[in-house]
Image: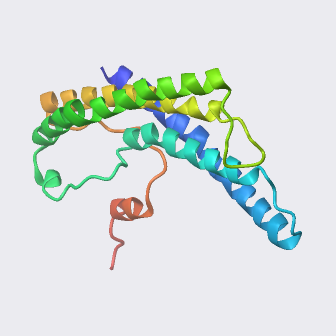
């Protein structure tokens, strides 16, 4: 079971890291647009659409990554005080009742939206550049599929925690500064 969980988690982390480069592309395109618009008085026709697509791609593909890193927002005022078996039981039920129906809808209807977009060779109506957006819409069902996979890994993780009373360690990746500070031991003499 651990191999399956870690394989899915590795895929989610890898995809999240790959799409993290959208931030760099987004930053460079915004900087370029600001420069040519205000310094050269020559705005582009493509920058806005590209920025929207980069942000959308980042947002969609960061979902499985955030789930794999247990980084989604959670109201855990009482949850964190509960024993691991109760936490895992609650998570297991909530994944089944709320997560999977929503994500299955994202995948199913996202596939329909992407299919229609490809059939019509859809272009953006927001810009005179009329850029193609069917490539971007394909990310909707892909993100849904990756979230389904990561959700299965989370269910398996919960099942294991219910049985053992301990959470499996997650794959290490970047951490929030606050988390790093909490992990440090107090220095001697402070």
Image coords of residue 36 (percent x, y): 84, 64
Tell me where residue 91 sits by quadrant.
top left
Image coords of residue 39 (percent x, y): 86, 72
Apparent side of residue 17 relative to residue 2 in the rendered image (left or right): right
Apparent side of residue 86 relative to residue 175 in the rendered image (left or right): left
| 187 lies above or below 101 | below
Identify which residue is drawn at 55% across, 22% down. 115
User: Which residue occupies the foreground of this view, 176 or 169?
Assistant: 176
Q: How is this picture coloured? A: rainbow
Identify which residue is drawn at 63% across, 30% down. 134
| 72 lies above or below 15 | below
| 100 lies above or below 86 | above
Identify which residue is drawn at 59% across, 45% down. 20
User: Which residue occupies the foreground of this view, 44 or 88?
Assistant: 44
Find the residue positioned furthest to the bottom: 190
Apparent side of residue 47 relative to residue 12 in the rendered image (left or right): right
Apparent side of residue 45 relative to residue 111 in the rendered image (left or right): right
Rendered-image quadrant of the C terminus: bottom left
User: Which residue occupies the foreground of this view, 16 or 58?
Assistant: 58
Rendered-image quadrant of the N terminus: top left
User: Which residue occupies the foreground of this view, 71 or 126?
Assistant: 126
Identify which residue is drawn at 79% across, 60% down. 32
Tell me where residue 85 sits by quadrant.
top left
Whether residue 6 is visible to the viewer of this picture, yes or no, is: no
Tell me where residue 108 sits by quadrant.
top left
Report how many numbered discs are placed on residues in the image.
0
Image coords of residue 60 (percent x, y): 50, 40
Whether residue 103 is visible to the viewer of this picture, yes or no, is: yes
Image coords of residue 131 (percent x, y): 73, 39
């Amino acid at each position: 079971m651990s191999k399956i969980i870690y394989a899915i988690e590795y895929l989610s982390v890898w995809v999240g890291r790959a799409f993290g480069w959208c931030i760099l592309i987004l930053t460079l395109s915004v900087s370029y647009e600001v420069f040519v618009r205000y310094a050269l008085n020559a705005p582009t026709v493509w920058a806005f659409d590209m920025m929207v697509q980069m942000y959308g791609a980042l947002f969609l593909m960061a979902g499985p990554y955030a789930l794999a890193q247990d980084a989604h927002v959670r109201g855990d005022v009482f949850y964190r005080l509960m024993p691991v078996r109760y936490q895992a039981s609650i998570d297991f039920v909530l994944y089944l009742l709320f997560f999977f129906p929503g994500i299955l809808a994202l995948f199913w209807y996202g596939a329909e939206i992407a299919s229609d977009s490809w059939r019509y060779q859809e272009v953006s109506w927001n810009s005179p550049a009329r850029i193609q957006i069917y490539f971007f819409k394909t990310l909707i069902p892909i993100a849904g599929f990756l979230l389904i996979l990561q959700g299965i890994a989370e269910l398996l993780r919960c099942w294991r925690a219910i049985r053992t009373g301990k959470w499996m360690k997650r794959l290490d990746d970047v951490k929030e500064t606050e988390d790093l500070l909490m992990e440090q031991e107090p220095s001697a003499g402070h």
